[in-house]
Amino acid sequence: VSEARFTPESAQGAANVLQSYYALLEAGKYGEAFRLREPSEGLTLDRFAASFERFSEYHANVGAPSEPQGAAGSLYVEVPVQLYGRLKDGRPFSNAGTVTLRRSNNVPGGSREWRIYTG
């Protein structure tokens, strides 16, 4: 992730939210991490936290964000992420993918903060 100055509303601001999210997960601060996600039907904090019980180590490398794309009053940014660590049984794991973040595009009443978008 770039170390250049950025605004919270920028694409780099979205990547910073994602970097914070994974740092919170790594530290076991699941409640704080959960609040950086958009609400998802059926996903409670307890279920979210329980999904990390199988890991003894959980880390992420966050890549450079895409340019923001607008649609239906929202802005979207995609950020590549590489996850890695160890399961409690000692086996290593790794996974790579893209995470989408969303925020309001200056729509009255919309959130101006980037949130992890669950679609």
Image (cartoon, grey):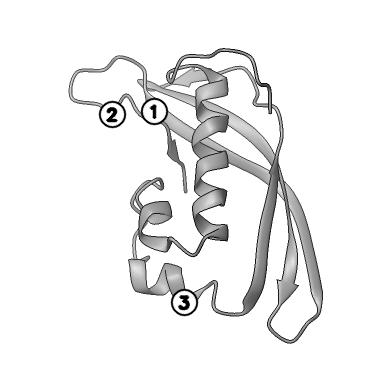
- Which residue is at a point 43% across and 18% down the rendered structure image? 9
Q: Nearer the viewer, residue 28 or 100?
A: 28
- Residue 47 position in % (x across, y down): 40, 73
Q: Which mark is residue 50?
A: 3
Q: In front: mark 2 or mark 3?
A: 3
- Residue 75 position in % (x across, y down): 45, 22
- Which residue is at a point 50% across and 47% down the rendered structure image? 21
Quote the CA–CA distance across marks 2 and 3. Answer: 28 Å
The tag earlier along the polypeptide, 3 or 1, is 3
- Which residue is at a point 54% across and 32% down the rendered structure image? 16
Quick one: label 3, few (<14), some, or many (20+) residues within 10 Å? few
The part of the image, by quadrant, that contains residue 95 is: bottom right
Give the amino acid at mark 3.
Ala
Q: Secondary structure at mark 3?
A: helix
Give the amino acid at mark 1.
Arg
Task: Return the residue at label 2.
Answer: 111
Q: In front: mark 3 or mark 1?
A: 3
Q: In the figure, 95 relative to 62: above or below? A: below
2 and 1 marks in contact (CB < 8 Å): yes
Q: Secondary structure at mark 1?
A: strand
Q: Secondary structure at mark 2?
A: loop
The tag earlier along the polypeptide, 2 or 1, is 1
Task: Return the residue at label 1.
Answer: 103
